[in-house]
Structures are given as C-alpha cells and as structure tokens.
Amino acid sequence: MTALKEFQRLEAEAVWRATPADQRKDVIVSLGDASLTILDLRENVLAHWSVAAVARANKGQMPAIYHPDGDPGETLEFGEDSAQMIDAIERIRSAIDRSRAKPGKLRVWITTFIAALVVGFVVFWLPDALLRHTVQVVPAVKRIEIGDALLARITRISGQPCMTRDAQEPLRRLASRVLGPAQRGALVVLPGGVAETAHLPGGRILLNRAMIEDPEEPDVTAGYILVERLRALSQDPLEELLIQTGLWSSLRLLTTGQLAEDDLDRYSEYLLSREPVPLANEVVLAGFETANLRSTPYAYAIDITGETSLPLIEADPVSGTDTRPVLSDADWVRLQGICGE
C-alpha cells in the first residue's frame, strides 16, 4: 500500500498501558509494515499491533487514544507532538477500511434486489397468475349468475328482451341449429343497446333486433350468431371481464364469489360500446364448416360488395352442397316478429 511505503520508518513517543490495572509507561512506537511495534525506552519490544486491527477510542479528540480492536483495556496514547504518527495511522486505517468488504452495502444491494423481485412479482406475475387461476376455478353456475347480472344492467339501457309467444320456439330452434342442442336458451334479442351482437359469461349471446328483422334469410342471422360464438371461444368471456375490471375484481371473485356492483356496471357499459373483435378468416370458415352453414350470406351481409369479405365467399365450406336449413320458412317468419309491432 502507498500509505505504508510512505510511513514505513516513522517513530513517535507515546504512553502505553497493557491493562487498566497496570501503570502507564512511556514508550517508543515504530510504524512498520502495516504494524505498530511498541518498545520501552531501552528498545525492548513490549507489544506488536496490527494497524488493520487498531481502533481509535476518541475520534477527533486529543490526545489520540488507540487500542486493539475488541480489547479496549490495552491503550496507546499519542500527544499533539505526534501528529505525523497519528496522521499516518489514520490514513493507513482508512486505506485498509476501504479495501474491506462493506457488509452494510452488501445488505443494501441484497435488500434492493429482493425488493425488486417482490415488486416484479406483484406487478407482472401475480395479476396474470391470479386472473388465470380465478378463471379456472369459477364454476359454470357462477358464470351464468354473472351473465344474468350483466344482462339485467344492459336491459336498463336496451329495454327488456323481445319475446313474442309465436317466436319462442323458432328462437330456440335457431340456437339449437347454430350452437348445438345444449344451447337452446342461449339467444337473447334486444330492442336496442347492442349494435349487432355481444356475448356474456355463461354462454348467452345478445342480438340487436335488426339482426332478426332485417335479413331476408336466416342464414345471415345464423352467421352473426356463429361468429359471435367464435369470439367467445377465442377468449373466455369471464377472463375478458376480469381483465377490464382489474386485479381487485379477480381477488374479490376468488375470495368472496362476488363481483362489485361498480365493476359489473362498468363492464356492461364496455360491452355496449366496444367494437367487435376481428377473427381470422380461417377461424371463421372452420366454424361455418363445423356448423354446416354457408358463409356466403354472412359475407355479403357484412360487405354488400363482397370485396372485403371475398375469402369467406370464395372458400365457402358448404357452397354447392346440400345443407340442413337453418329454419323453415314458417319459423323464420314467426321469428322476425319477435319484437312485435
């Protein structure tokens, strides 16, 4: 070390005491290679101290009193006339101290790293994990209950669902034909609110009355229903709800089995205002093929020119083949009067 080389032949007078019970002795202190040698006036060696293990008992005060680290009973006292020795010892101790590992700083770094991991866990991993777990454990009956609660809020804006007596059975047949026999009660026709179609947790699909009244053939309506069903299959409706309402919504549902009224209100408003989620043509065509439905009527309904929906026309999976009718003419007429006059 530079400090040691600079002061390697330094000597100074001091007062030394081996123990608190011993008398103080005048001594000569020689600064060597990172050590202090204590000699009596006859130059007999009384003690060796390692500078690295020397502590100062009265920092900044005079006379300067030093002792071996951990043994304050043995002391070495330098007066003001030994300023050069005091300065040398202090500089060597500082240099040695800088070269030591700093446990405090290490603890700070470790604590900071752990805190960063915890924050990262809470911010990035926990919400997604909690969301996925909640979606997995919520049973079907609870999903239906949530869907009912959302429908009740939507109908405050849209009006009550349309359902004339003559249209009840045709609507069930339409749901069964497009969605399967288990979904006979899945369709809800609303007089307003929903622009075209929407879906709820629990399996319900909402249709604006125009989706029933305007098309000339039921294949168009069936196409809208099928595509909305495909959207529901592309992302779990409950998952979408929890993403929109946030982490606390997932936590509340997981722990209490309930959703806050404000969350339900916000999501019902979101459903009525959002744009339909686009689906890949391949997904849509596969859905039409599975349901044995023509995609061409739906393609012309979403674009009367057929330009933007040309893939659905050219690749119609059941075009030119015998298909099971969506509804009989009589059922279609009765269904189109579902909202009455």
Image (cartoon, rainbow, N blue to C red):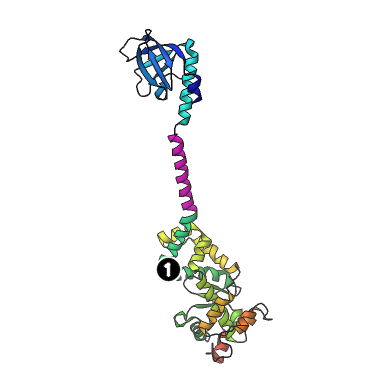
Residue at horizontal 48 percent and vertical 47 percent from the top: 116
Furthest-left residue in view?
21
* Place of residue 239 in the rendered image (x, y in percent of width and height, measured from the top left): 49, 65
Q: Is residue 258 visible?
A: no
- Expressed as whole percent of the image width and height from the top left, the position of residue 169 reads 49, 86
Q: Is residue 175 above or below residue 99?
A: below
Note whether 15 is above or below 245 in the view shown.
Answer: above
* Residue occupying the point 47% across, 40% down: 109
Q: Badge 1: how crowded within 10 Å, few (<14), some, or many (20+)? A: some
Q: Locate the C terminus by quadrant.
A: bottom right
Counting from the top left corner in percent of width and height, residue 340 is at: 58, 83
Give the dominant element type of the magenta stretch: helix, strand or loop. Answer: helix
Q: Which residues are magenta?
A: 101-123
Instruction: Give the amino acid at mark 1.
Output: Lys
Going by the image, does 254 lie left or right of 227? left
Secondary structure at numbered mark 1: helix
Q: Where does label 1 land, which residue?
A: 142
User: Residue 217 in magenta?
Assistant: no
Along the line of sight, the residue nearer the viewer: 316 or 5:
5
